Image (tube, rainbow, N blue to C red):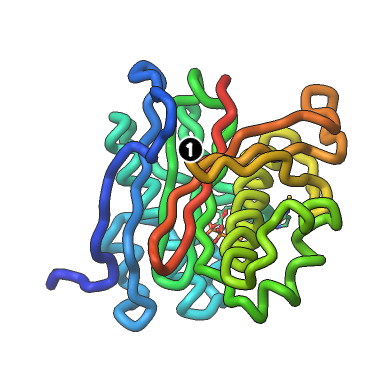
Amino acid sequence: MPASSFISALTIDAPAWPEWLPPESPLVLVRCHFSVEAYHDDEFARHDIPQPLRLQRAVTKRRSEFLAGRICARQALAKLGIDGQAGSKAERRDPIWPKECTGTITHSHGVAAALVGYARHWQGLGIDIEHWINTESARHLSSAILQPHEQQLLDEDDIRFAQQLTLLFSAKESLFKALNPLTGTSFYFHDASLVHLNEGAQTLTLRLDCTLNEQWPAGTTLICHYSYSPAYITTWLTIPA
Ligand SMILES: CC(C)(COP(=O)(O)OP(=O)(O)OC[C@H]1O[C@@H](n2cnc3c(N)ncnc32)[C@H](O)[C@@H]1OP(=O)(O)O)[C@@H](O)C(=O)NCCC(=O)NCCS
């Protein structure tokens, strides 16, 4: 089969981490670029990844982002020594991971990533990539994403406000991806809020403002990490086992 240009710039790394990431609890972050224009349906077979039934009527963009995420997941699992895949559920979108590990997938406008670790170290992981929201959209979206008291914590300057809003949007998506599979409970943007943003360490503290279950009561705080490029921000949230 000729080489495919669907996937490019695939990197396998540990996520950037401000503190010491214990070597005995590794995390693998795989990121790639993918081209919707270069996508053909034979890419699933080429990468030996089953296409779920529910994607068969999906548009090309949806098929390509799903596949790119699964390719990242496969590479991350392989780096951990696991010869497996992130499977799919018929009715829910959170992936099924091989029992030894847990992970999380994201994709946004031609970029996909997966973050994977061993289940004995991590009970939940959430990752999200968001391309920067522009200044005009940021002002429109802010009340949907932020509670009124969070808006007071962000910079008044339009550009900085849009950057921080993108960060919070992404961080809350990462929070949801880490906690929804663990708790089975849905929650929304106003159910969590920013406590503290540490731009030096590239972390932010989020607080749950609703109770998800006995283990995850309102008031629980969690740290989210982030890194960014000129085009997009990546956030990830890890819950130790
Ligand atoms: C799931 C959700 C958080 C992100 O979906 P998205 O906008 O498509 O974002 P991304 O592309 O970054 O991530 C999609 C991937 O997340 C994963 N995912 C989907 N639902 C998930 C869930 N419930 N739990 C964990 N991971 C999930 C999947 O791997 C999916 O990709 P795939 O379908 O190709 O496998 C969002 O759609 C959603 O359901 N939001 C509602 C609740 C919410 O946002 N709450 C914010 C809480 S503060």
Note whether 92 is above or below 184 in the view shown. Answer: below
In the figure, is residue 112 to the left or right of 102? left
Helix or strand or loop: what does disc 1 sit on? loop
In the figure, is residue 17 to the left or right of 38? right
Q: Position of residue 131 (x, y in %)?
A: 50, 68
Between 210 and 195, the one nearer to me in the picture: 195
In this orientation, does residue 188 appear? no
Per the image, the residue denoted by label 1 is 201
Q: Position of residue 19 (x, y in %)?
A: 43, 26
Between 9 and 98, the one nearer to me in the picture: 9
Q: Position of residue 152 (x, y in %)?
A: 78, 55
- Is label 1 within 8 A of ligand 1 (CB to nearest ligand atom)? no
Query: Mark 1: few, some, or many residues within 10 Å (few <14, many ≥20)?
Result: few
In the figure, is residue 184 to the left or right of 166? right
The residue that appears at 67% across and 78% down in the rendered structure is: 137
The residue that appears at 52% across and 45% down in the rendered structure is: 199
